[in-house]
Image (cartoon, rainbow, N blue to C red):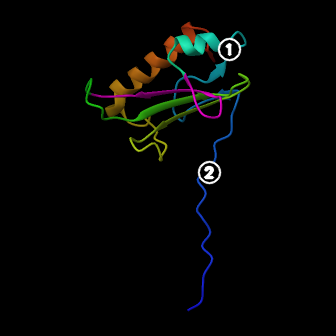
Amino acid sequence: MIGLAVKPIKKPIMAFVTEKHLDDSQYTYKLSPSIKKYTLMDTTFIKNKLGNYELTRILENVPNSGDGPILKIIVKSDLSGFKLSVTDKSGLKNMNIFKSADNKMIQEKFYFQMNALVDRGIFVKA
């Protein structure tokens, strides 16, 4: 029997960016120049193992159902960049919640969350 080397499949790593536009979204989001670490903690970002600040929210069609896409935001520990994604419930596959009019409630919840972060000085809308 011949031993075969199996290469592990690497999940693509999303780089930190200074601005992000989700496909078909109305806005582009940029980190605010006045962002502060304590503001991240006040808005329920938690510090992960790498020292980055992470916020995860379920965008539910039906409140308290626990069923819906996941909004995930990670801000780099030195506040120089961020990652923003909307994924399926497993967190593995990116979703475009703006493609279909059927997602109107989910879109409203996304904009509500992002507007709250804009109001707190974490992001600016462009």
Check residue 53 for magenta coloring.
yes
Calculate the distance from the C-alpha at mark 1 to the C-alpha at mark 2: 27 Å
Q: Which of the two residues, 51 or 57, is positioned nearer the viewer here? A: 51
Instruction: Determine contact: label 1, label 2, CB under 8 Å.
Output: no
Q: Which of the two residues, 17 or 79, is positioned nearer the viewer here? A: 79
Identify the image quadrant of residue 3: bottom right
Which amino acid type is shown beneath numbered disc 2? Pro
Residue drawn 52% across the image and 28% down it: 25
Residue drawn 38% across the image and 41% down it: 89
Provide the residue designation for mark 2.
Answer: 12
* 44 to 24, vertically: above or below: above
Report the magenta residues as a range: 46-61
| Place of residue 105 in the rendered image (x, y in percent of width and height, measured from the top left) | 33, 24
Residue drawn 71% across the image and 22% down it: 79
Q: Which of the two residues, 28 or 36, is positioned nearer the viewer here? A: 36
| Place of residue 43 in the rendered image (x, y in percent of width and height, measured from the top left) | 51, 13
* 49 to 107, vertically: above or below: below
- Tell me the quarter of the image containing the C terminus: top right
Task: Say whether disc 1 or disc 2 marks the residue closer to the N-terminus.
Answer: 2
| Place of residue 19 in the rendered image (x, y in percent of width and height, measured from the top left) | 67, 27
Numbered tag placed on residue 32 in the rendering: 1
Identify the image quadrant of residue 31: top right
Mark 2 crowdedness (10 Å alpha carbons): few <14, some 14-19, many ≥20: few
Which amino acid type is shown beneath numbered disc 1? Ser
Mark 1 crowdedness (10 Å alpha carbons): few <14, some 14-19, many ≥20: some
- Tell me the quarter of the image containing the N terminus: bottom right
Residue drawn 68% across the image and 39% down it: 15
